[in-house]
Every structure is written in structure tokens, then in C-alpha cells.
Amino acid sequence: MSENREPRRPRRTTVQLVSGLDPDVCYRALKSRDARFDGRFFVGVTSTKIYCRPICPAGPARRENCRFFASAAAAQEAGFRPCLRCRPEVAPDVGSWRGTSNTVARGLAMIADGALDGDDASVDDLAERLGVGGRQLRRLFQQHLGASPISVAQTRRVLFAKQLIHDTRLPMAEIALAAGFGSVRRFNETFQQLFRRPPSAIRRKTIASLPEGSVGATGVTVRLRYRPPYDWPAMLAFFRARAIDGVEQVDDAIYRRTVHHDGSLGTVEIAHVPSSHCVSATIRVDDVRALPRIVSRIRTVFDLGADVVAIGAHLAGDPRLAPLVAARPGLRAPGGWDGFELAMRAVLGQQVTIEAARRLLSQLTRLCGTRMHNRGEPGLAMAFPTAAQVARADLASLGMPGARKQALVAIAEAALADPLLFEPLDTVEDTVARLRAIRGIGDWTAHYIALRAAREPDAFPSSDIGLLRGAAIARTAVTRAGERPTPAALHAYAERWRPWRAYAAQYLWAADGTIT
Ligand SMILES: [Zn+2]
């Protein structure tokens, strides 16, 4: 079975609940409103048929009336409806399945991308894309989330719609479309059934000050929560150093960029709201149906779902890494907005400085990217080129070796031939092997793409010079003379960091100073 080849589980820590919830631990967390458990479980109250986050201001129900669920979908599948006070839809997205089942993680990412929306979508097709059988997929979802893939998709639609109703003044018809309901009628029926009231009755009166109108005209702002701590300055500095002219703009507080999804152009703007443990994302896009995918990208790029406390506890088990972990609480792994874009960044970043790579990427964008219509946002004039644009472009004027230009074209052609090229496979080794089959992609590039684009938490480009220098500073895998390790030695040493080697890499890069 493919699951047997998955990375080893991280060590259990006091806040970790893997596969199966301990009701006593859950009830204790509930009584103390322990924020560390927010997003890790939900509590259904049998006397009210409502389910809550562990931090609900309404306070805990009696022990005998509480049922605990690993996911919101499991609570809804069992007939509970979301609480209107603690709002399960805004709980941080930190599942206990992370690091334990790649298949579940990949399946959830595809569902968030709309894989089970629409009348012709099926669980068997999703399973096939994931390389498992339909029955196996249902079993894995049941084991890790306590709910079926269909329930997860339905719950995601309802909760996303509920968040948009609550936090925006988007017209209801647009919300129905954005959340993947297919029709306004189905949207109304679902809400009537679940909340015993129409969607409009859920809308708060306090949002009257928000701009009213479609997502294309006024944009929509949603708040996306994470589990603290969050090293925002490190994240922003990473993007600032790599910002592509015309595509991205990063100042002291805000990240802005243009986006391009299935022919729909737009912009996003991300700011940190530390007091609420969330980022605020303002999205402007022509087609409202692109909204869930853009939200899911933002979560990935800013690594909002990472359980940094559990990951840090695992990595600090290595005494040589422990001081680095302690020095940078909340350090996360920045992601790539788009697999193809990230692959271009990886190739153009080979053996040059970050600044030189940035200039080459800006030049590539000017050569063949899409010019944005005037949206009144100076500095955001270009969308990053698509694979088709790069495949057709004349790259002669790019100041770099011919072999690397050929690699850009080879990746563009491979991406056109296989739209799933940058999605993770069952194991990090499989993901890397598929990428390495492309001419011009070596081990470093493949691991780098796996880490930032496929979001493999266990990817580790062990030949990276910054990692080798960071390893020497941390004295991990060093030679007897205390010198920089060989890539093979670092690779062997890194075994103890599985399944979170990508995060160990962030700490080593931070030690070396290459993170910014
Ligand atoms: Zn509640």
C-alpha cells in the first residue's frame, strides 16, 4: 500500500492529536479554552446540535453532551450545524493529519481547488488523480478527518460562503458562485436546511460600512487565520528580496501582486493582523469563481496552515537545531504562487545571487508576460508569463547560459503537456523524480520546486550552498575539523528531521542569513 511509504510521523507532543481524538484531553482543552487546540478539533453539543471551536465564548457544555470531531466536516456529517458565535469557518486550518498522510493533504488541496465542485465531479476521479483507489481514499479521509471527501467538499463550500456572507457585502448570487454551489437555489436550500434561515439573515448589520459591489469592482477582503506564532518580518523580507518588477510589490507591511487564473486577471494584497492571529487578504479578480482557489493559494504561499509549534518541538529534538528553533519562533516556509512561476524562479536562481535572479525574472516578465488592464494600481502592470508564453518566447536577449534557457523552455513544454506537473505525488521522492525527468532540472532544482511549489514538508535540497553553510554554523553533520559538510553528509544527517525537513531547511537558511 502506498501509505506505508509515507514519511515517519513526528514525535507526539502534548498538543498533538494524531488519528483519533482523546475525549479527556479535548474536554480539558475546552474547559480552559486552550487556543492551542483551535482548528485541531471541533466540539458538537448534543443538546443544541451546534458545533463549536474549542475557544467558543459561549463556554463549554456539560461533558456528557460533548462529542469531539477531527474536522468541521465530521461534525456536519454527524448532523451538527456551525455556531454563529465562534464561527468554525474562521478557525485556523491546522489539521492533525499534517505530516502523517500525504494523500489526505494532497486530496484536501485539490478539494480546496474545486476538485469536487460541479455536477460531474466524482470521488473516484479525485482518487485516480491521487493515485489511490476510491475506497482507499474514503478510508483515509475517515481515519484522519472523520468525514467523507464529499462531506469535506460540502462543508468547505458552506463555510466559505458563510465567511463571505459575514465579512463582505458581496451580492448573494456572487457568493453562491464563488463558493462553488452551482446555483443560487441550491445555495439557499443548503443554508435554509443547515441554519433554518436564508443566507441574508446571517449577514451582520455591522458591515454596512464595507464597500458594496462585485468582487471585480470593489474587491473583497477576507481574514485568514493561522496558529501563532508567525514570523511575519521573515516572510515579508523573503518576498521583498525576490519581488518581480511589475508583478509584485512589497513594502514594510504589505505584499501585493498580480494573479492570473484560467484567463481571469486580478490582484491580491496581503497584510498582517497580529492581534487577531490572521492575515487580511484583499482580492480583486474578474471572475468570482476564482476566489476559492486564490484564497487557497494565499494560505499556501504564506504557509498559514503550518503547525509551527508541533514542527518546532519535533526539530528541537535535535540538540544542534534546538537553538535555531528557539531563536526564530514562528518561522515558516514561504511558498510559490504558482508551480510554473516557481520553477522559472528556481532555474533562473541557479548559481546567481538573489538580486541577479530577480532582475532576470523581471526581464522574462517584460519579454513575454501579460500586460494588465489599468486597475488603478501603479506598480502592478504585468502578470507573470504562462507556460505557453514562455514556450513561444524569443529568449535570446536574456543574459544567461543557453543551457538554462533551454531548461526554461523544456519546463514550459512539460507543464503544457502535464497540467499536474507541479502537484505533489505520494512521496517527496516521487515528486522529485518526476521533476528530474525534465531536461535541465537537477536534484537541487527538483527539491527546491518540491519545497516551494508542491509544498512538500519533507523536501530538502541538501546540495544548497546556503544550507551547507547554515549546517556548518549549527554544527550539524560537520566534518571532524568542524568544516562545512558534504551534501551527502547533510542528506544523511537530515534523516532525523523527517517528515519536516523543509522546515529544518528554513532554520539553516536563517542561520546562514540567506533567508532574506
Ligand atoms: Zn461556538
Image (cartoon, rainbow, N blue to C red):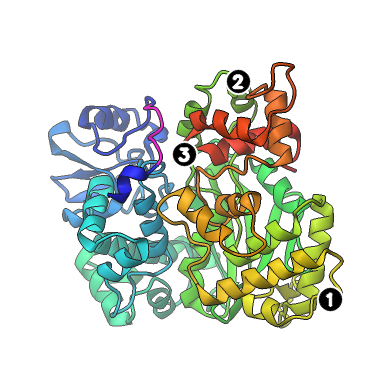
- Name the amino acid type tagged 2: Arg
- Name the amino acid type tagged 1: Ala
Label 1, residues with CA under 10 Å away: few <14, some 14-19, many ≥20: few
Q: Nearer the viewer, mark 3 or mark 1?
A: 1
Give the residue displayed 29% in from the left and 51% down from the top.
Answer: 72
Q: Which mark is residue 195?
A: none
Query: Seen in the image, is 124 located left or right of residue 8?
Result: left
User: Circle 3 sits on which residue?
Assistant: 307
- Mark 2 element type: loop
Q: Nearer the viewer, mark 3 or mark 2?
A: 2
Query: Where the C terminus falls, by quadrant?
Result: top right
User: Circle 2 sits on which residue?
Assistant: 320
* Residue nearest the observer in this picture, 33 or 91: 91
Can residue 344 be seen in this snapshot?
A: yes
* Residue nearest the observer in this picture, 2 or 181: 2
Q: CA distance from mark 1 to mark 2?
A: 47 Å
Q: CA distance from mark 3 to mark 2?
A: 21 Å
Q: Please state the total of marks drawn on the protein image.
A: 3
Image coordinates for residue 141, horizontal then vertical, percent: 26, 52
- Mark 1 element type: loop
Give the residue displayed 23% in from the left and 31% down from the top.
Answer: 22
* Residue nearest the observer in this picture, 199 or 279: 279
Can residue 203 be seen in this snapshot?
A: no
Query: Seen in the image, is 417 located left or right of residue 136?
Result: right
Q: Nearer the viewer, mark 1 or mark 2?
A: 1
User: Circle 1 sits on which residue?
Assistant: 396
Magenta segment boundaries in residue numbering? 7-12
Residue 393 belongs to magenta span: no
- Name the amino acid type tagged 3: Asp
